[in-house]
Amino acid sequence: MTLKKLPLTEHMQATLAKVLAATRGCRPDMHELDEQGIDASIVGCNLDNAMGNHVDLNAIKEGYQEFVVVLRRDGQILEINLASLIALARRAK
């Protein structure tokens, strides 16, 4: 399957900008992030991106929290929806 080269939506542009900012200075292959000061965890049970880039405690309790990757670095926390990250990866050259 070939993906058409379409411009990124505003949401996807914002997601990409957040990921790039959070990982600035890291190795291009993202190997051994713990040695570069980044800690990560994944929260959720549903692969979708309808709810956006956040963890919702009620959604966790009710069992419909979408998978969200939580990156922590230098006191900063970034929550990025896993389905959105997959969508970005599919668009990469």
Image: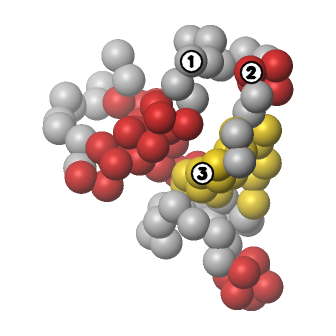
Badge 1 crowding class, 10 Å Cα cut-off, few under 14, some 14 to 19, many 20 or more, is: few
- Dot 1 falls on a residue whose secondary structure is loop
Of the 4 image quadrants, the one containing the N terminus is top left
Q: What element carries label 3?
A: strand
Disc ID at residue 78:
3
How far across and down, in percent of the image, does residue 85 sit?
A: 51, 42
- Of the residues under marks 1 and 2, which one precedes in the sequence? 1
Numbered badge on residue 25: 1
- The kind of residue tagged 2 is Gln
* Percent position of residue 62, x then y: 74, 87
Is residue 43 visible in this depiction of the protein?
yes
Which label sits on residue 16?
none
Query: Mark 1 touching mark 2, by CB under 8 A?
Result: yes
Q: In which quarter of the image is residue 73?
A: top right
- The quadrant of the rendering that contains the C terminus is top left
Q: Is residue 48 above or below residue 28?
A: below
- Residue 36: assigned label: 2
Q: Which residue is drawn at 64% across and 49% down?
A: 76
